[in-house]
Image: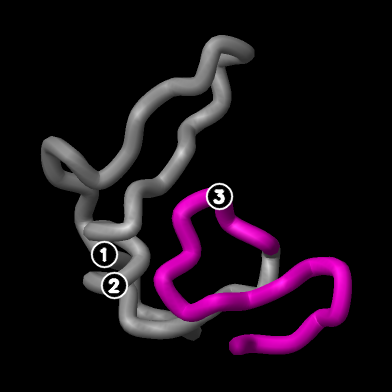
Amino acid sequence: MKERIPLEEGDYYLSEQGYRVFTEKYLLKRGYCCESGCRHCPYGFNTKTNTQN
């Protein structure tokens, strides 16, 4: 099981639709790409090609 990272202020914000959107800060702190096409992915994952840049 992957390690749970506790959420801190600045790790996410709520979209207009009410979804939690993780920030680049949190995704870097998590330490890996989940390959879900996160809006602020610092790892360069592309959902169209399913590859990292």
* Distance from the alpha carbon under mark 1 to that under mark 2: 11 Å
* Residue at image coords 14%, 44%: 8
Mark 3 vs mark 2: which is more N-terminal?
Answer: 2
What's under tag 1, amino acid-wise?
Ile
- Measured from the top left, where is residue 23 in percent x and y? 34, 49
* Dominant secondary structure, magenta: loop
What is the C-alpha distance between the residues marked 3 and 2?
13 Å
Question: From the viewer's perspective, is residue 33 above or below residue 11?
Answer: below
* Earlier residue among tags 1 and 2: 1
In this view, the residue in front, 47 or 10, is: 47
Question: Circle 2 sits on which residue?
Answer: 28
Amino acid type of the residue that numbered disc 3 sits on in the rendered structure: Arg
- The answer to the question of whether label 1 and label 2 lie on touching residues, with beta carbons closer than 8 A, is no
Tell me the tag on residue 44. Answer: none
Q: Which mark is residue 5?
A: 1
Q: Is residue 53 left or right of residue 46?
A: left
Location of residue 29 in the rendering, given as x and y in whole percent from the top left corner: 23, 71
Is the C terminus in the top left, top right, bottom left or bottom right quadrant?
bottom right
In the rendered image, the vertical position of residue 46 relative to residue 7, given as above or below: below
